[in-house]
Image (spheres, rainbow, N blue to C red):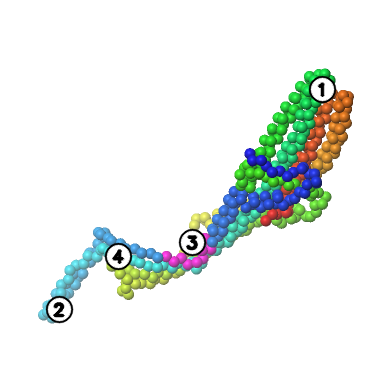
Amino acid sequence: MKIKFIIIIYFIPVIIYGQDVLNDYVRYGLENNLALKQKLSGYEKSIEALREARALFYPNISFNARYTISEGGRIIDFPVGDLLNPVYATLNSLTSSNIFPMIENQEIRFLRPTEHETKIRIAQTLFNSDIYYNSRIKKELSVVEEMDVEQYRRELTAEIKKAYYNAAMTDALLLMLNDSRKLLVENVRVNRKLIGNDKVTPDYLYRSEAELDKFDQELQNAEKNNKIACAYFNFLLNRSLRDSIIIRIPSDFPVLAQLTGEYTRAALENREELRKLENYEKISDLQIKMNQSGRLPDLFFVADYGFQGEEYVFNRDQDYMQASAVLTWNLFEGFRNKSKIKQALLEKEMAENQLEEARKQIELQVMSALDELSAAEKGILAAQSRLKNSRESYRIVERKYGEGQITLIEFIDARTTLTRAEENLIISKFQYLSAFAEFEKVAVINKIK
């Protein structure tokens, strides 16, 4: 793993912190996240589907050419000779001439030996309710896809922030544990020296070494957690999993008492989930109207201009033009359309119930996020008080241990309590930041473009 450049002293305002680095990471993630790119592709696909639906309003112009060679087939015998030759013979006899020649019976083939037809056809829909409502439904579906993209952007923003805070937390814990380890190493060194001077028994050294081994195991686990947290953060940004991370945490993060606003109302107005369900409700209405308009006829206009003949030539003798108005009207479909209307009505009812349920869920989410934020804020105050008391206790115990007034076990216990208090304060502060990122997500505030 590459050495990470870390600029972090956990929540000590000596260093200038900023939110710009995190916002830049969020913007980078919104541009490069693979899952978001898939959502964008789905939205672009819906736009193309809308264009396809609108294209049905335009005329369709096609060029068709056919050349056929035939042999055999049905033949109609037309006895024209048998019908006319007696008449012609009588006429010739009366006129004493051969003006009327004898003719042969004719055979007419259904299939001509050679035939061609080349034409241009223009077809235009004059009235078709399905095309109209299909276009409107496709438009609403494209809006749903757009809302889906916006929803994922909001959720991804919160996920990136949480991953960033988690990576920062594991770094801070790792730094704190490394500092604490120095004290344990020093304790081992002092005990060895005391044993050499016959000041303490060997069990002191064994206990301090055992505590150091235990601490090293905890340190290895913290390093593992740090690698996983950084890798997940890079995964969300679609970067190499081993890329370095610059971490700057603001020292003045928002206090719950400073938050003002109608967050529940804002969430109900801006959450994409509700807007998607509202669009689904519109789609259900359009489907009802489309099925109800199925009782109406469809009207089309078709015009052909081309050439027909036995030889593949184009001249005035073979050209033709044909125009048609076509009316189709389904008078009975076995009550199929009635069932479609009933299904659409049920879908609309389901969409209305889902919309109402979603509103209540969002209200619950905002309430829960505020409660989590309040609990996290109180947790910071408790962690600060715990750390303060642990430091004072450790200071007293360390002095007593140096004077030989207490045992090694009591000293190690005080040091462990202080380490746990420092660890708890770090976790509490980063949990608050993560809870605030979740609150931003559910209340739809501080959206990054």
Residue 261 x %, y %? 79, 55
Between disc 4 and disc 2, the foreground one is: 4
Regarding residue 322, the answer to whether it shows in the image is: yes
Residue 116 x %, y %? 31, 65
Span shown in magenta: 52-62
Between disc 1 and disc 4, the foreground one is: 1
Q: Which residue is tagged 2?
A: 99
For mark 2, give the secondary structure: loop
Query: What is the C-alpha distance between the residues marked 1 and 2?
Result: 152 Å
Work out whether mark 1 precedes mark 4 in sequence or the reverse, and give the earlier one: 4
Regarding residue 292, the answer to whether it shows in the image is: no
Tell me if mark 4 has few (under 14), some (14-19) or many (20+) residues whose alpha carbon lies within 10 angstroms of its own.
some
For mark 4, give the secondary structure: strand
Q: Which of the two residues, 287 or 383, is positioned nearer the viewer here? A: 383
Query: What is the C-alpha distance between the residues marked 1 and 3?
Result: 104 Å
Kindly indicate the quadrant of the structure image that contains residue 324: bottom left
Query: What is the C-alpha distance between the residues marked 1 and 4?
Result: 116 Å
Q: Amino acid at mark 2?
A: Ile
Q: Which residue is tagged 4?
A: 115
Tell me if mark 3 has few (under 14), some (14-19) or many (20+) residues whose alpha carbon lies within 10 angstroms of its own.
few
Work out whether mark 1 precedes mark 2 in sequence or the reverse, and give the earlier one: 2
How many numbered tags mark residues here?
4
Tell me if mark 1 has few (under 14), some (14-19) or many (20+) residues whose alpha carbon lies within 10 angstroms of its own.
some
